Image (tube, rainbow, N blue to C red):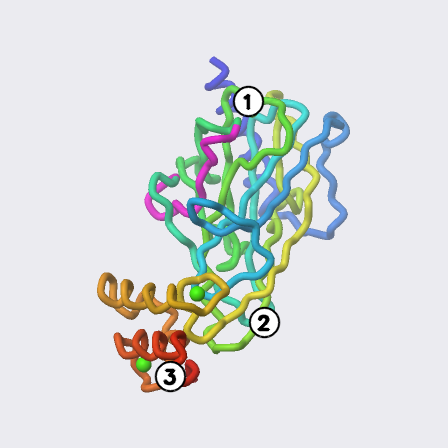
């Protein structure tokens, strides 16, 4: 019963929000949700960035080639029955990134978002887009562009229980550039423009929509280091091992090529790993990288 009611309400909320308002909507930065005043209770959305491995570590600098996840934290003082969130990851100075698919993600090609099984959001009911397909959708709307992601409707049929700040969702990405060794750029993460609220939209059981408080954008420096191919920020024997493993298992194309050609012969192969080992153990010259 709750399930079907919530589904109808959330669908109605999305239909109203997007299909009715969207075509005529002009964002002037001053449009408030009509129902905000009915829901004064506190809700909050925040993000941080950690390494995407077994022991996630908070980072303040990103390495080209490294795997990271943006963790989405939510605190709510009353039950949430639906949420629509948009995020953007972009650079003004040449930093590049790409999605990292996750096993067990939502949908065949939309799996770079995962739900934290340790959170009170788990098990999640549905994640769907505006056409109500059960997916997490990336790059769906023109207004979002290639640097944005829309977590469509997150339906929580029993309601997301009250609770303190908790890591709910993760968005997985790899830093893909800049690829020139020694260069530094900046990658920023923020909420994405999402009409009609210009931010996140949550709704309660009655379908009232409102905007949670938002922690604001995070910008991190991105560093490209010649020979540092395993995505941490140190150049050491681990990089040579990583290079060899990747070359023999998946091929050199899987590496950040410009950072791998450490002997500057315009090819990436076992010779680069040997060159790197020689440098690390003090026998050879510095990594080159054009
Ligand atoms: Ca390294
Ligand atoms: Ca080479």
| Label 1 crowd (10 A; few <14 / some 14-19 / many >=20) | some
Query: Do residues under tags 1 and 3 come within 8 Å of each other at their CB atoms?
Result: no
Residue 50, above or below 221: above
- Kindly identify which numbered label has been placed on residue 93: 2
Residue 74, horizontal then vertical, whole percent? 61, 35
Closest to the camera, between mark 2 and mark 1, is 2
In the image, is 98 to the left or to the right of 199? left
Q: Earlier in the sequence, mark 2 or mark 3?
A: 2
Residue 186: x percent and y percent? 59, 66
Look at 22% across and 65% down and name the residue there. Answer: 248
- Residue 197 visible at all: yes
Quarter that holds the C terminus: bottom left
Dot 3: element: loop
Alpha-carbon span between mark 2 and mark 3? 34 Å
Q: Nearer the viewer, residue 142 or 82?
A: 82
Task: Determine which residue is flagged by label 3.
Answer: 284
Disc 1: residue Cβ within 8 A of ligand 1's nearest atom: no
Packing grade of label 2 (10 A; few <14, some 14-19, many >=20) is: few
* Ligand 2 within 8 angstroms of badge 3 C-beta: no
- What x and y, as percent, mark residue 95? 53, 68
- Name the quadrant where ligand 2 sits: bottom left
Range of residues picked out in magenta? 106-119
Which is closer to the viewer, label 2 or label 3?
3
Image-based side of 171 in relation to 262, left or right: right
Residue corresponding to mark 1:
159
Q: Secondary structure at mark 2?
A: loop
Q: Determine whether label 2 and label 1 are within 8 Å by CB.
A: no
């Amino acid at each position: 019963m709750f399930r079907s009611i919530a589904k109808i309400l959330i669908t109605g909320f999305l239909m109203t929000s997007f299909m009715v308002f969207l075509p005529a909507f002009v964002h002037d930065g001053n449009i408030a949700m009509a129902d905000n005043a009915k829901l004064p209770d506190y809700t909050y959305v925040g993000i941080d960035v950690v390494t995407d491995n077994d022991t996630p570590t908070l980072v303040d600098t990103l390495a080209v080639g490294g795997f990271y996840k943006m963790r989405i934290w939510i605190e709510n003082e009353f039950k949430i029955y639906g949420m629509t969130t948009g995020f953007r990851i972009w650079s003004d100075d040449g930093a590049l990134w790409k999605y990292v698919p996750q096993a067990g993600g939502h949908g065949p090609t939309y799996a770079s978002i995962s739900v934290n099984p340790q959170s009170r959001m788990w098990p999640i009911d549905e994640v769907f887009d505006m056409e109500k397909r059960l997916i997490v959708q990336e790059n769906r709307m023109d207004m979002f562009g290639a640097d944005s992601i829309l977590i469509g409707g997150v339906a929580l049929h029993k309601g997301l229980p009250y609770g303190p700040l908790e890591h709910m969702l993760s968005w997985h990405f790899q830093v893909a550039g800049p690829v020139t060794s020694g260069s530094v750029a900046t990658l920023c993460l923020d909420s994405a423009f999402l009409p009609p609220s210009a931010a996140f939209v949550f709704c309660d059981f009655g379908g009232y929509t409102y905007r949670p408080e938002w922690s604001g954008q995070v910008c991190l420096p991105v560093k490209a280091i010649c020979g540092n191919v395993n995505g941490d920020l140190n150049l050491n024997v681990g990089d040579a091992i990583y290079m060899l493993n990747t070359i023999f298992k998946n091929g050199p194309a899987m590496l950040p090529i410009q950072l791998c050609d450490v002997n500057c012969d315009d090819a990436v192969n076992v010779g680069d790993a040997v060159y790197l080992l020689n440098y690390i153990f003090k026998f050879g010259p510095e990594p080159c990288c054009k």
